[in-house]
């Protein structure tokens, strides 16, 4: 099998001055793409002096290896300027890797508005601004690839990271909607929850574990997802230490009761085991899946008062 190539394509990598972003930038440049290396060079918590250096070092490394890259120092909250850098320098944008991120870990009891707002700004608004600016180009050229970055903290929760967890799960919902809206324009969006050694994890994981979690081991998955031949769209992946897996929602077989006077908290409690029975699960991928359940409910017929469920979930009078 020949190697995956990205010749003639333009890749924007946010937060590419270090960690995972740097590895993405080096890889795509080595496979023929022109890369916008974005990084404002701030501290891990989003504060500190910005330094152009981190992005410049990556650009120099790419150029020294014969690749094409340009630096951009804007915050992702000004994502339109980052995409503008791609358009001005290379005339197009094909692939967007929303990777920039910060942490402001603090127990929820001690969380301040600033801890919440900064995390939302960088992760949620930043990813939105970049994708929003790239979107018209993607639609016009009928091609676009987006990878957003979630986290296990978002999928499962994590002590001291209420702000970060909320922002990271937002990346999942954001991705799912981009995937649905983009599909007919050949715009694919997927989301990854990586785990890798970087300045984000170096203080919370022991050195032997970190050694097994090289940031470059996230790159091959992202490379597959954004390739022009990839059909993957709207999927969630976990990746780290050479392991890659897909995640999806699972719904229990659930409890369906007739919507009449017997539909009480006590009736639900009596059959609580069925509410959480995962023996015959379903794997919903959209709101439409829930409508199927409502149809089943309608099949149960009207209640004693002649009422039945309509598709909005309200009890409606049967005429
Ligand atoms: P990192 O701290 O090494 O890299 C993040 C980069 O983003 C830094 O170079 C930083 O300067 C840049 N950045 C921060 N705010 C920015 C802004 N407003 N505008 C532009 N650039 C900005 O961290 P790492 O580990 O490489 O993280 C990359 C992504 O992966 C982040 O979104 C992070 O939340 C996520 N992630 C990482 C995990 C890990 O195990 N390393 C685990 C789960 C998620």
Image: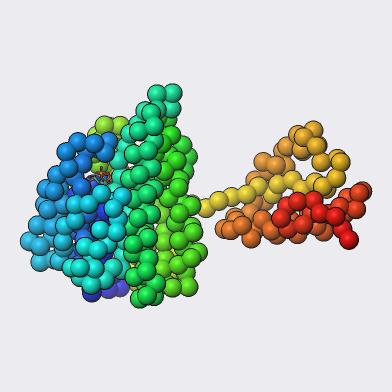
Q: Position of residue 124 (x, y in %)?
A: 39, 48
Q: Position of residue 69 (x, y in %)?
A: 16, 63
Residue situated furthest left in the rendering: 64
- Residue drawn at x 87%, y 58% is 318
Residue 319 appears anywhere in the view:
yes
Quarter of the displayed picture in which ligand 1 can be seen:
top left
Corner quadrant of residue 11: bottom left
Residue situated furthest top in the rendering: 109
Q: What is the count of numbered marks?
A: 0
| 195 up-or-down from 191: above or below | above
- Residue drawn at x 45%, y 45% is 169
| 244 up-or-down from 31: above or below | above
Frontmost residue, 33 versus 125? 125
Left or right: residue 250 compared with residue 63: right
Left or right: residue 64 compared with residue 129: left
| 79 up-or-down from 49: above or below | below
Q: Position of residue 221 (x, y in %)?
A: 34, 58
User: Quadrant location of the C terminus?
Assistant: bottom right
Corner quadrant of residue 229: bottom left
Frontmost residue, 221 versus 123? 123
| 137 up-or-down from 306: above or below | below
- Residue drawn at x 37%, y 60% is 132
- Residue drawn at x 17%, y 42% is 50
Frontmost residue, 29 versus 187? 187
Q: Position of residue 85 (x, y in %)?
A: 21, 62
């Amino acid at each position: 099998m020949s190697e995956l190539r990205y010749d003639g394509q333009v890749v924007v990598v946010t937060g590419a001055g270090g960690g995972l972003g740097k590895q993405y930038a080096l890889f795509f440049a080595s496979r023929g793409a022109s890369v916008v290396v974005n990084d404002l060079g701030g501290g891990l918590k989003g504060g500190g002096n910005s330094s152009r250096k981190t992005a410049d070092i990556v650009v120099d490394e790419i150029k020294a290896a014969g690749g094409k890259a340009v630096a951009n120092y804007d915050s992702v909250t000004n994502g339109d300027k980052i995409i503008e850098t791609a358009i001005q320098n290379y005339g197009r944008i094909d692939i967007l890797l929303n990777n920039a991120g910060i942490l402001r870990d603090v127990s929820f009891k001690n969380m301040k508005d600033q801890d919440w707002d900064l995390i939302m700004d960088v992760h949620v608004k930043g990813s939105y601004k970049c994708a929003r600016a790239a979107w018209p180009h993607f639609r016009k050229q009928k091609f676009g690839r987006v990878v957003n970055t979630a986290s296990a903290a978002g999928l499962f929760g994590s002590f001291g990271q209420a702000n970060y967890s909320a922002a990271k799960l937002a990346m999942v919902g954001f991705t799912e909607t981009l995937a649905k809206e983009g599909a007919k324009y050949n715009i694919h969006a997927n989301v990854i929850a990586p785990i890798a050694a970087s300045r984000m994890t170096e203080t919370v994981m022991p050195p032997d574990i970190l050694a097994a979690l090289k940031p470059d081991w996230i790159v091959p998955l992202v490379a597959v997802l954004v390739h022009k031949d990839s059909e993957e769209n709207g999927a969630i992946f976990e990746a780290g230490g050479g392991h890659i897996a897909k995640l999806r929602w699972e719904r229990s077989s659930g409890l369906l009761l007739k919507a009449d006077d017997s539909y009480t908290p006590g009736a639900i409690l009596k059959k609580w085991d069925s509410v959480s029975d995962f023996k015959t699960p379903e794997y919903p991928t959209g709101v439409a899946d829930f409508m199927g359940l409502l149809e089943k409910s309608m099949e149960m017929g009207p209640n004693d008062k002649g009422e039945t469920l309509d598709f909005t979930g309200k009890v409606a009078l049967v005429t």
